[in-house]
Image (cartoon, grey):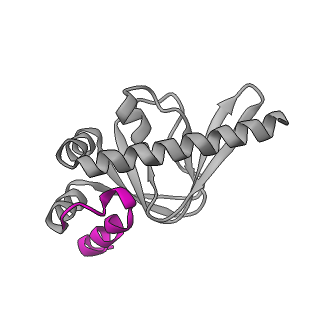
Amino acid sequence: MTLETEVQSLRQVPMFRGIEPSRLKLLAFTSERIRFTAGQTFFSQGDAADAAYVILDGRADVLLDAAGGQFKVAELGRNALVGEMGILSETPRSATVVAVEQTIALRIDKRVFLDLLTQFPQMSIAVMRELASRLERTNAQLLARSGQ
């Protein structure tokens, strides 16, 4: 995957759409491209939040540890951003993310991610909208699981 391909992928992520191409190129250049095999963990619930990831290709499951065992709360695919919640809240990871199949992701360092939010207020708004949407989906899943 080339730098240009990575920039094109970043453009598909809703919160990066308003960022100028030269800045996206710098983001892609400074980010680490990581290949995960099926079953490999991006990070585990409770880990320190040191980076966010953009899935360039492949799929990953978001899993929560609960008293009854681990359960899946979401499946993420191409152009999904994951791991930003821990960065924003400065708390340990709230979930485990595991590749479902071979997956390629860009690892965006915490400092770089926070710099982007500071420089691009529209990105901050997009992140808030995405987090609110995730909270709504999680609440609906929890209600469904409890039988209400």
Please state which of residues 136 and 7 is positioned toward the viewer in this rendering. 136
Please state which of residues 129 and 7 is positioned toward the viewer in this rendering. 129
* Magenta segment boundaries in residue numbering: 1-20
Residue 86, horizontal then vertical, whole percent: 42, 33
Please state which of residues 27 and 17 is positioned toward the viewer in this rendering. 17
Q: Quadrant of residue 128?
A: top left
Q: Is residue 92 left or right of residue 7?
A: right
Name which residue lies at 24% across and 70% down: 3
Name which residue lies at 29% across and 54% down: 32
Residue 72, horizontal then vertical, whole percent: 68, 45
When the figure is inspected, residue 5 is found, relative to residue 20, above or below; the finding is below
Residue 9 belongs to the span the image colors magenta: yes
Q: Quadrant of residue 99?
A: bottom right
| Residue located farthest toward the right when viewing the structure as drawn | 147
Total number of numbered discs in the rendering? 0
Q: Quadrant of residue 117?
A: top left
Q: Main secondary structure of the magenta part?
A: helix
Residue 139 belongs to the span the image colors magenta: no
